[in-house]
Image: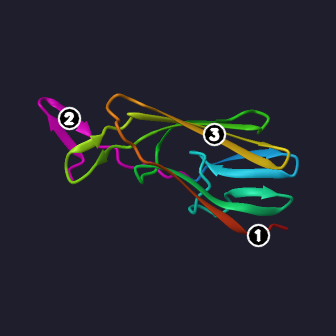
Amino acid sequence: MDEIIQVKDQFYILVTSARLDGRTRVLKHDDTFAVFDLAGDIGRVGQGAEGLYHDGTRFLSRLELRLEERRPLLLSSAVKRDNAFLAVDLTNPDVAADGPLELEHGAVHVFRGKFLWRGRASRSASRRTSATCSRCGVRSARGAAACCRRR
């Protein structure tokens, strides 16, 4: 598939994947903390420190959001000064199947808000679609840690 598409006198560059980055976002409340990537995922890349921890034990080692089986593109990501809330804005990459563009990047907006409170992790995700998006597969994958106690 060509990455540059010409429509009349306009050129369009396909955006099909997010740039991987090793930076993390950390939330903490009492004896509980969580380490996420910039998109709010707990993934399997990097140093492997991402996860949800309570009292020194990792309870969650994987939590990933996908749109049409692809990693969403990061728009913005910030943690409040007190490390209590993570706000992430994402959008979809270009989705093309065997040539034609099915879903242009930016057609779907996803907001993820995450916070920790009294030993529990909470998260919320909402999506807003444009008129050009009649269907869009959203999937979340989770994985429990094998209770890895950190010392």
Give left or right: position of 109 versus 57: left
Q: What residue type is labelled 1?
A: Cys
Nearest to the eye among marks 3 and 2: give it. Answer: 3
The residue carrying mark 2 is: 11
Crowd tier of the residue under label 3, counting other residues whose Cα lies within 10 Å: few below 14, some 14–19, many 20 or above: few
**Residue indicated by mark 1:** 148
Residue at (39, 43) in percent of width and height: 136
Please identify the dominant SS of the magenta region. loop
Q: Name the residue under label 3.
A: 124
Where's residue 55, x and y in %? 86, 59
Q: How far apart are marks 3 and 1 (CA)?
A: 26 Å
Quarter occupied by residue 93: top left
Q: Give residue 33's mark.
A: none
Magenta residues span 1-21
Q: Are marks 3 and 2 in contact (CB under 8 Å)?
A: no
Residue 149 belongs to magenta span: no
Q: Under tag 2, what secondary structure? A: strand
In reply to whether residue 10 is colored magenta, the answer given is yes
- Look at the image and tell me in which quarter the C terminus lies: bottom right
Mark 2 or 1: the one toward you? 1
Name the residue: 74% across, 45% down: 27
- Dot placed on the residue nearer the N-terminal end, 3 or 1: 3
Where is residue 54? Give x, y as percent: 82, 57
